[in-house]
Image (cartoon, coloured by chain):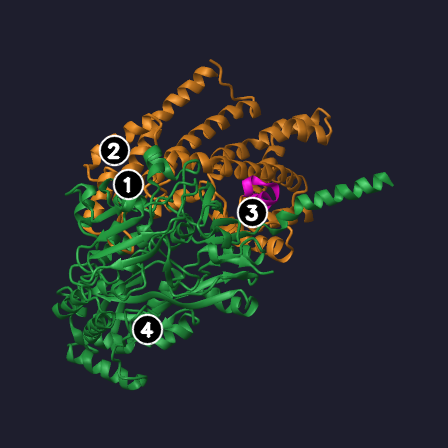
Amino acid sequence: MLSIRSLLSALALSSALFTPQLYAQTLNIGIIGEPASLDTSQVSGGVWEADVLMDFFEGLITKDPEGHRIPGVATSWDISDDGMTYTFHLRDDAKWSDGKPVTAKDFVFGWQHMLDPASASKYAYMLYPVKNAEAVNTGKIPADQLGVESLDDGKTFRVTLKEPAPYFLGILTHYTAYPVPKHVFDQYGQQWTQMDHIQTNGAYKPTRWVSHDHISAEKNPEFHDAANVAIDTVNYYPTEDRNAGISRFRAGELDVMREYTSDRYQWLKENLPDATHMSPFLGSYYYVLNHRDGHPTADIRVREALNLAVRRDVMSKQIMDNTFLPATALVPPGTNHYETQHMTLDGDDMNARMAKAKNLMQAAGYGPDKPLNLRLRYNSSDEHKKIAVALAAMWKPLGVNVQMINSEATVHYQAIQNGDFDVARAGWVADYDDAENFLTLLHTGVGNNYGAWSNPEYDRLLDQANITLDEDKRAGLMQQAEQVALGDYALIPLLTYVTRNLVNPELQGWEDNVQDDHPSRWVSFKK
Amino acid sequence: MLSYIAKRLAMAIPTLLIVITASFFLMRVAPGGPFDGERQLPPEIEANLMAAYHLDEPLPMQYLRYMGNLFQGDFGPSFKYKDFSVTDLIAQGFPVSLELGGLAIALALLLGIPMGVMAALKRNSTVDYLLMGTALGGIAVPNFVIAPLMALFFGVILGWLPVGGWNGGALPNLVLPVVALAIQQIAYIARMMRASMIEVLGSHFIRTARAKGLNERQVIWRHALRPAMLPVLSYLGPAIAGIITGSVVIEQIFGLPGIGRYFVQGALNRDYTLVMGTVVFYGVLIVLMNLIVDLLYSLFDPQIRYDD
């Protein structure tokens, strides 16, 4: 009898010991690349890096599950009437994972570190709206002259801008604006992101990193909202082979698989309908037209004809299996406080459009005797190839001979930056949810303006918008500017990106959103 | 023997120097640079980057700097993976590739040699055709076809084995990648073994052995097997160096942290230091493996001796 009782109590004890483990939640995420670094000044700019960093760090402003801006380390902020000074009031309970308080000094230091020429940060220009940022980044003046300061013993962070930048709050959700733990950096220098050293102020803290295998992170008990964070462990698996990632998802090894390939969409939708997510994304897929002298695309008639002949609906539905949406503008639909513009393409009657396009080509001096030879560049990938081939086929009836040149991304971008093309594939994914981020691509003298399109009216409207604080007025100016560009057929808008994710149907709090941001702090398993 | 080894190692130095120098300059001839990407960097930021990696110096200066660091065992920082040095990346990835490749080679020898011997002994029989047919299939079907199919069947459909991940080298995670890596090697070794076994069995010393009245088993085990292994042995040197430095295909499909991918990714990203690091590492391995194979010859072929 005694032995049975002791056996039972032993069983009870063991079950009590093991019970808590049943509730420990682990989230396995397949990210699409290996992060270059956990130091925000050293990352390469991949979306997979943002996936990881947003779990580890929190900026002044952060995002809710739907991607809306909500207070982060700052609980509130005041903007001066001239739009030049932003004053952020930091929360009292913001702490690093070692329990030390997060202060305005960590932001001051983080931003100085980002702009330090020695950091050689690729993304430092994101902070250029801050006063003296560019001069600091180019080494002309010391970092302490940057327009940021810590007040009230670190409880207040004040930023002075170079000029009013109404999109500034949007930038603050980007990882370039995260704080850096100064006390850790002071101790370890560049080695501060090593697993033994790193301290974070986000919902998670990394504990192990095996390059190209996985990063493991544990819930950060010091995080101010830790009580509402459900997942205890997050593992990030770099999954470069996305088809292999789909297999791993199907085998239950991954709970989230980011960016499945578009050619698998139909199959996934039929076979894993509850897990297959797709939604609009703030990303534009477009073709650059070369406006430099000597290129046929410098002629507006050619540009209009090329635009008219493109069947964007066919491109979206038949060629890309509905994994892109047709687009007739540079700024994608869904952009914050912005009304989508459209290029004038004379309706859906393709016969009429083609007739007009042919006339335009003729007027520009091209015809059966003198075909237009176009050098088309794209960076090697199955998707880009399909689209390039379709474009060439759509232009064929206009008597256009397309010479296709495909090269790896590095070579492609160098070539188009040097203007070595007539038409070239390009894409842009929003860094922050604001039309300005897209429209800058066509501003005179901007590096990413590959086609060297230049229009004084456009520049004037955009510059005006960038110092206009009234949101409606500003949107109006930007919309007007985009109309100028579209009216001049400055580019060939083609498609809008969509987000493509596989998500375990047992997860809740994982919401589709236009920037495809999914902090793990909001996610939990049902039941 | 020792002086032979010393001589071979001394000879390897100029070879490696040429490989390193050629790779260094060839890499720079490739169009594009490490900082070219979708987003063009403002000139001042690009200048910061070039300065940070000494890419603003004249090329000969960069070469001397690289060689100087290399002689101190410093492969430099990776241009892409900033939280790891090239040495870190190789040190972390090589054990993985070594374990995978080592197991795959062992499996290939364990299956390939008996398959080849059996096919040679049963020459032109059903057994021979079956074995060689299978081997031909193994050579013909590339591993980027076999590996996902195996993952799908054993991982997703049957659920017996993990589809991917290294998991610290746990046995279930090793099975599929090791088999996928070994299949082609099994096939090569089996075909090579069959051909050389047939040749050896037709030679004079085997006829003599048979004439002495030895039974067939003794003829094969004692006299034929060792010389028949020689072609396999010379194949193994570069094959082992190749397989233990990783396979980019297998690593990507199974999501394994080996060093194979660094060759490809390093080159695509123009991550100069990473490419150089892997080239130097691979070069040294090839030299070493070839030396080991040459030394092993003396065990298998009595005509070869490395006496001082």
The kind of secondary structure element at disc 2 is helix
Query: Which chain is drawn using green?
Result: A
Q: Is residue A146 left or right of residue B183?
A: left
Residue B105, position in %: x, y?
56, 37
| Dot 2: chain letter | B
Residue B115, position in %: x, y?
64, 41
**Tag 2: amino acid:** Tyr
**Tag 1: amino acid:** Leu
Q: Nearer the viewer, mark 2 or mark 1?
A: 2
Mark 2 and mark 3 on one chain: yes
Using the rendered view, name the quadrant where residue B193 is placed. top right
Circle 1 crowding by C-alpha within 10 Å: few under 14, some 14–19, many from 20: few
Counting residues from the start of the chain, the first of labels 2 and 3 encountered is 2
Which residue corresponds to mark 3?
B180
- The residue under the point 37% across, 43% down is B81
Query: Which chain is drawn using orange?
Result: B
Which residue corresponds to mark 1?
B26
